[in-house]
Structure formats: structure tokens, C-alpha cells
Image (cartoon, grey):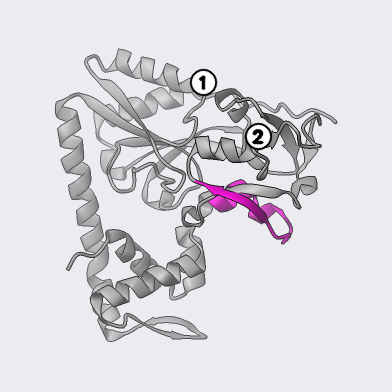
Amino acid sequence: MDVDTRLLRYFIAVAEEGSLTRAADRLFVSQPALTKQIKQLETQLRVRLFARSRAGMALTEAGRTLAERVPALLADWDQILRETKSTADRAAHVLRVGFLASAANEATPHIITEFTRRQPGWRVDMRQAAWSNPTAGLIVGDVDAALLRLPFPGQESLRVEELFTEPRWVALPTTHPFATCDQIPFRDLWDEPFVAALPESGWWRDYWLATDERDGHPVRIGAVTDQPDDWLSAIANGYGVALAPESAARFYARPGIVYRPVSGVSPSRVGIAWAPADDSDPVVQAFVRCCLDNRQPQHDKTTGC
């Protein structure tokens, strides 16, 4: 019987937290999605893993047996994957770097250039991930390092250094009444339909909807996408608006869309992340140092209305 390791990761989170709500918060997924995954695991194993009650989720005897073995199994599997994939790429002198959206913005080519200067014969393979993969493959060993938006699911198990912050702006169709505003209070956008990421993206979706900064005001969803091109098309076609990093105005400019500053919402943060096992890896650490040496200066470009 084959069991998806993702299901085991969800299982151990619920086992350790003793609560679907707390485990969902820890995993940055919705509680209904987590419940569905736990039921799927129980169906595959044909055993009941939890006794559910108002007090929370208590492990059954079978569940306790599984919980005793899963952490070590997952740790071993992650290390095996990381070493196997890394060995193949290291033989070819390739450093795999995952990223979401615009990576480290304008600093990215400078980082790569500096890395290849410091590590002659090596090249960087930049691998863009979908929004539903907020670690860009780092957590499962698909890449050696990743340029990511912070925080992200699984961050506590990785090394992370923040590189810079940038304001969150809003992307609007050019026909929108707010399209000519110099700056838009976030509160004025609360009733607008938003273009959102897939529900499975958990934290990523909630963060770019700013669900924690709406004072409990419900979010209206106008469209759901998982790739930048689809996201841009949905906005241009008037299905909704969307929060985006300020740099999106430069990296994702297209006809039919304008980007405007937003007040009253926290900035986005970008960091470099890598596995603790690579603390002593000279190649990974050379890339990390290049990222830190090319940090972007902090700035505030907010303007009045």
C-alpha cells in the first residue's frame, strides 16, 4: 500500500496539536481541507486514527502506534530525497533554486551573477513554483534553496533569512473606478471581489486576501487561479481585484491592468530559505551569502491621495 507522505505530515500535525483547528493553523490550510485529508488517510489504512470529541482529537491505539513511527520516517525520507536529488545535480555543478512570483525582484540577476563569479563552473537552475507550493519544492528536497514570501508552511523546520520588505499594492482592471487613485485605503477594497489562489494553498491564499486585516469582514471571491498568467487574465477581464507586491507593477505589467498603492495593509516580506542539513554545504552557503550581500534597501513609496 502506497501512502502520500503529505497525508502523514497532516496526520502528525493533528496528533501533536490534538486539535484540527490548531493543526490547520500550523499547516496554513483550511480546517475542512485538513479533515478531508485525515479521513482519506484513515480510509487508505482502513483504521481509525483519532477519536473525535468536543475536547479535540485524541489518538486511538492504532493512531498512537503510527504517531510513534511517522516523525522518524518522514525525516529519513526527506533526507533521502534531498541527498539523491542533490547528488545528481552536484555532479553536474547545478544549484537548484526555487522561487515564487518575482523571486528577489531586481536583485535576482545580481545574486546569480555574483554566485557564478564566486563558484566558477557552477550554474543556477531557477525553478518557478505554483502558488499552491509555497516552499517552491524546498520542503521535499526538489530544490537546494528557495526565494520565498514569508511566512510560509513548514518555515519552522528550515533556515530562513529575510532579505527585504515591499508594500502590498492592488491590481485593478483599467476600467475600475479606483484605477486613477494615487492611493487606496484597504478598507475601501473590502467589498470588492478578489481574485484568489486555490483553497489548498492555505496561507498563501489568506495572506494575499489579507484575511487577518479585515476586522472580520468577509472576503468576496470573484475568481480562483494558481498561475500568474491566469491571475492577470482574471483581473483584466474584470472578475476581481487582487493584492500584489509593489514589484508586480514592474514584473507583471500588461494591458488592461493598473497597480495602485494601498494604505492600511502590512507589507510583504521576501527571504532566502534552505535546509538545516545544508548549513555546512559550501555551495548552498555561497548562494545564501550572495543573497544577503545583495539585500535590497528598505524604502517606503506611499503617496497621498
| 39 lies left or right of 55 | left
Q: Identify residue type, mark 2.
A: Pro
Can you give x and y, in whole percent of width and height, for residue 129 in the image? 40, 39
Marks 1 and 2, how far apart at CA? 15 Å
Can you give x and y, in whole percent of width and height, for residue 134 in the image? 44, 46
Number of residues whose C-alpha sits closer than 10 Å to that of mark 1, classed few (under 14), some (14–19) or many (20 or more): some
Q: Identify residue type, mark 1.
A: Glu
Instruction: Label 1: state its secondary structure.
Output: loop
- 210 part of magenta stretch: yes
**221 versus 256 height, above or below:** below
Please name the residue shown 20% across and 36% down the image: 86
Please name the residue shown 49% across and 21% down the image: 107
Magenta segment boundaries in residue numbering:
205-225
Instruction: Name the residue tied to disc 1.
Output: 106
Can you give x and y, in whole percent of width and height, for residue 285 in the image? 32, 30
- 199 part of magenta stretch: no
Please name the residue shown 40% across and 52% down the image: 154
Specify the quadrant of the image occupied by residue 69.
bottom left
Instruction: Label 2: state its secondary structure.
Output: loop
Instruction: Name the residue tied to disc 2.
Output: 167
| 5 lies left or right of 261 | left
| Label placed on residue 23 | none
Q: Are marks 1 and 2 in contact (CB under 8 Å)?
A: no
Q: Is residue 16 visible to the viewer in this orientation of the structure? A: no
Q: Earlier in the sequence, mark 1 or mark 2?
A: 1
